[in-house]
Image: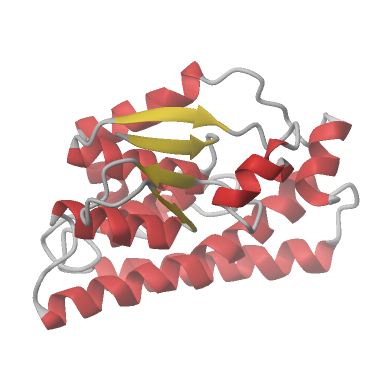
Amino acid sequence: MIDLYYWPTPNGHKIALMLEETGLAYRIKPVNIGKGEQFEPAFLKISPNNRMPAIVDHAPADGGEALSVFESGAILQYLAEKTGRFLPATLRGRTTVMEWLFWQVGGLGPMLGQNHHFNRYAPEKIPYAIDRYTREARRLYGVLDRRLEGRDFIAGHDYTIADMAAYPWTVSHESQGVNPDDFPHFKRWFERIAARAATQRAYAIADTIEGRADPSKDEEARRNLFGR
């Protein structure tokens, strides 16, 4: 059994996607980041960077005691290695997937996160910041679009953890100032992943989570997400 410490954010969705695809038994442990639950000592023992998602695997492959893993990219890699799925065994195939996984965690996610912040949540609308991150979003979508030309998925014709990492960050493309019609290879890829049964199950989890707050309207949520 795997405990998934989760909130319905792009990084939370990544791990739900992987767990639904693999069929591993798991249970949701909500971490209400708007209420500041990511700062509680018990959670910090699992995720010292006070960020979700994190997991605790109660049946690790080495047969030892329960193992916790934090950081979404590390969790995806861990689950891929645990199940032998969605990460190629070959040197070149694995390297390609890891390149694009790191591209997402080091570039796509942080830059689109800044885009969201300055476009939607910042109390002051700063034209330079909005323009900066809208331009960067379009650049990154262009990188992804070129990569997907002639390919079904990021690493080739097989769905991998690289796709699971990138997809949730692109769900809000409209609010990022991105028109998918400008990126036809991305649009085809996006629609293919959205149609997967596991994707639909993963996103349905969000509907079961209570207590979500809009940080643009809720001062406590704003303080816990951006001010601590």
1 sits left or right of 181 in the view: left
Q: Look at 11% across and 61% down and name the residue there.
A: 157
Quarter of image, res 221: top right
Image x and y of residue 96, in percent? 23, 77
Image x and y of residue 46, in percent? 55, 49
Residue furthest front as drawn: 64
Q: Is residue 105 above or below residue 79?
A: below
Towards the viewer: 128 or 121: 121
Image x and y of residue 123, in percent? 89, 47
Quarter of image, res 222: top right
Q: Is residue 216 visible?
A: no
Q: Look at 48% across and 26% down and name the residue there.
A: 206
Q: Look at 64% across and 63% down and name the residue there.
A: 134
Q: Is residue 92 above or below residue 208?
A: below
* Tally of marks: 0
Towards the viewer: 189 or 6: 6
Q: Which quadrant: the N terminus?
A: top left
183 sits left or right of 140 in the view: left
Q: Is residue 228 visible?
A: yes
Towards the viewer: 212 or 146: 212
Image x and y of residue 68, in percent? 44, 51
10 sits left or right of 132 in the view: left
Towards the viewer: 59 or 205: 59
181 sits left or right of 147 in the view: right
Q: Look at 90% across and 52% down and name the residue there.
A: 124
